[in-house]
Amino acid sequence: MDNILNRILIEWDNSDIEDSGIIKASDVKKYIQYQLVYKVNRRGRIKIFNPINNGYKKYKDKVYINGEHIKLDRNGYTVNEYEPGEYHIYIEDFDKVKKIYNSAFNNCRGLTSVTIPKSVTSIGEEAFYNCRGLTSVTIPNSVTSIGDYAFAYCEGLTSVTIGNSVTSIGDQAFYGCSGLTKIEIPSSVTSIGEDAFSCQ
């Protein structure tokens, strides 16, 4: 957490600092926005990224779990094991990524929540394929395209909010999302792929 806190303290706008001009690191923690939430049902390692995509290579050394810097192995899993529970994950510079790469979080079944950065313009093929623990997704207005199978077999998904800049939704993008009960498609969408919402 020290790396994150130090960076925030350095970049902190002086107008936001108390009269003393000093702010405690512990006070800054509440301003850190965690991007991923994972639920662990039994003791084990957590799969953060799919190892075959560029996103993993770029961010594998910038992952924090509950504020602690952690290491990933070559398969995209944490080196350490974790007890059952809920874990909040922060990835440095993730808020600057332009694309969620193909298969980036493929088969990350413990992933329950994701905050897609507003910098993202496209969500790649199979980006969240088979993330069965994912319950809700908000796709920001910055995103213009959702790739094939992007959220296929995310059986835990109950609602999806699609930003008003999305123009295309790929083939089977939400295929097999059997729990999906609500989705709003904006008027900006001009192309919906085959079986995109074949959820049952």
Image (cartoon, rainbow, N blue to C red):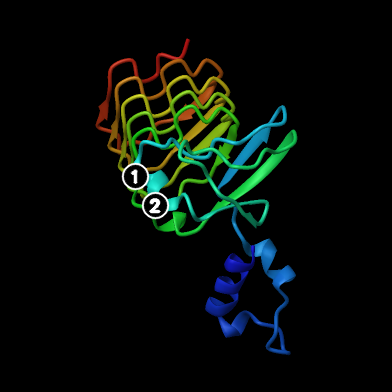
Query: Residue 167: which numbered mark, if any?
Result: none
Crowdedness of circle 2 by 10 Å Cα count: few (<14), some, many (20+)? few
Quarter where residue 193 is shown = top left
Residue furthest top as drawn:
200
Q: Residue at x 40, y 33 (%)?
A: 127
35 or 184, which lies in front?
A: 35
Between 150 and 53, the one lying in front of the other is 53
Q: Which residue is mark 2?
A: 58
Q: Position of residue 70 (x, y in %)?
A: 59, 51
Measure the C-alpha gap from mark 2 to mark 1: 6 Å
Query: Which amino acid type corresponds to the residue marked 1 in the rendered image?
Result: Asn
Residue toward you, 150 or 68: 68
108 shown above or below 171? below
Residue bearing the label numbered 1: 54
Residue 181: x, y in percent? Answer: 54, 21
Do labels 2 and 1 touch, CB within 8 Å? yes
